[in-house]
Image (cartoon, rainbow, N blue to C red):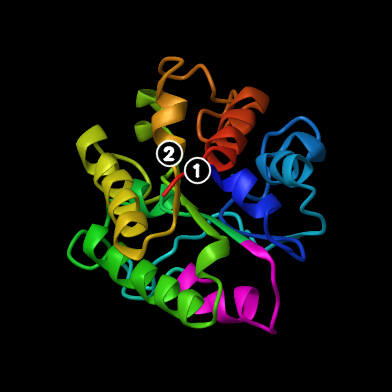
């Protein structure tokens, strides 16, 4: 059973989404065309509690300057996702900025991402949310996107980026939760076709593909 149908069989109290600027809806032409809104509409999952913060990463590892990136996911997931008892579905789309960051490979890397993502998932499952969680692989980045970004967020390779895709896929398998193949679905139309003019964020069609990946997530 796909994730959307699974949620319809449960009595969810809403949807919580957790991630970065893409989950915040950047570059969707209207708020209702951002992927979280499309998903909520498909499963009658309102209200949406959007806990995305643009520019953030999931892991709390030290960056090149010696400090973790502010508002990282592992540092704020308790207040965002476990603030009170609830029956909300939890959709997590993280890893895009973790994968793009190249300035501190000794500390900021895929191993740190897996470590901190595992911590989040263990806590969510222990709190009783395991049946309502879906995690998505990082959205596809066009080849040109590897040269676009602020300090530290350029210079990644396709192979290096895809380590994070593989990591999320393996985490979903390990924890027996729903996996949304966001990267894989966005790759299908061709490089750059789902990107907005800034290259970094998806256009409306890209947001729709992300929504569809979560809708059809499987475990």
Relative to 67, 15 lies left or right: right
- What residue is drawn where x is 72% and y is 63%? 12
Q: Please say if the residues under marks 2 and 1 sit with CB atoms less than 8 Å apart.
A: yes
Of tags 2 and 1, which is closer to the observer? 1
- What residue is drawn where x is 42% and y is 19%? 188
Badge 2 density bin: few <14, some 14–19, many ≥20, Cα 10 Å: many
Quarter holding residue 80: bottom right
Residue sitting nearer the eye, 176 or 102: 176
Measured from the top left, where is residue 39 in percent x and y? 69, 43
Measured from the top left, where is residue 215 in percent x and y? 59, 40
Residue 80 inside the magenta-drawn segment: yes
Q: Earlier in the sequence, mark 2 or mark 1?
A: 2
Label ID, residue 199? none
Location of mark 2 (residue): 181
Measured from the top left, where is residue 108 in percent x and y? 28, 63
Residue sitting nearer the eye, 77 or 180: 180
- Whether residue 61 appears in this view of the structure is no
Location of mark 1 (residue): 217
- What residue is drawn where x is 31% and y is 55%? 173
Badge 1 density bin: few <14, some 14–19, many ≥20, Cα 10 Å: many
Measured from the top left, where is residue 134 in percent x and y? 51, 55
Relative to 5, 126 lies left or right: left
Above or below, 194 relative to 49 = above
Residue sitting nearer the eye, 43 or 90: 43
The residues colored magenta run 70-89
SS category of the residue bearing label 1: loop
Relative to 170, 7 lies left or right: right
Q: CA gap, disc 2 to disc 1?
A: 7 Å
Residue 145 inside the magenta-drawn segment: no
């Amino acid at each position: 059973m796909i994730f959307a149908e699974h949620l319809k069989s449960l009595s969810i109290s809403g949807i919580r989404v957790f991630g970065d600027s893409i989950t915040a809806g950047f570059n969707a032409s209207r708020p209702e065309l951002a992927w979280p809104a499309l998903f909520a509409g498909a499963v009658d999952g309102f209200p949406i509690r959007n806990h995305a913060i643009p520019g953030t990463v999931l892991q709390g590892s030290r960056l090149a300057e010696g400090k973790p990136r502010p508002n990282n996911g592992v540092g704020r997931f308790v207040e965002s996702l476990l603030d009170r008892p609830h029956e909300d579905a939890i959709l997590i789309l993280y890893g895009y900025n973790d994968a793009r960051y190249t300035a501190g490979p000794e500390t900021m890397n895929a191993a740190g991402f897996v470590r901190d993502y595992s911590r989040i998932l263990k806590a969510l499952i222990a709190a009783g949310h395991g049946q309502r969680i879906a995690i998505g692989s990082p959205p596809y980045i066009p080849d040109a996107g590897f040269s676009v970004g602020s300090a530290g967020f350029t210079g990644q390779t396709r192979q290096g980026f895809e380590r994070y895709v593989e990591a999320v896929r393996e985490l979903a398998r390990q924890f027996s939760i729903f996996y949304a193949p966001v990267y894989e679905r966005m790759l299908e139309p061709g490089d750059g076709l789902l990107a907005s003019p800034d290259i970094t964020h998806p256009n409306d069609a890209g947001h729709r593909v992300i929504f569809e990946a979560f809708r059809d997530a499987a475990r």
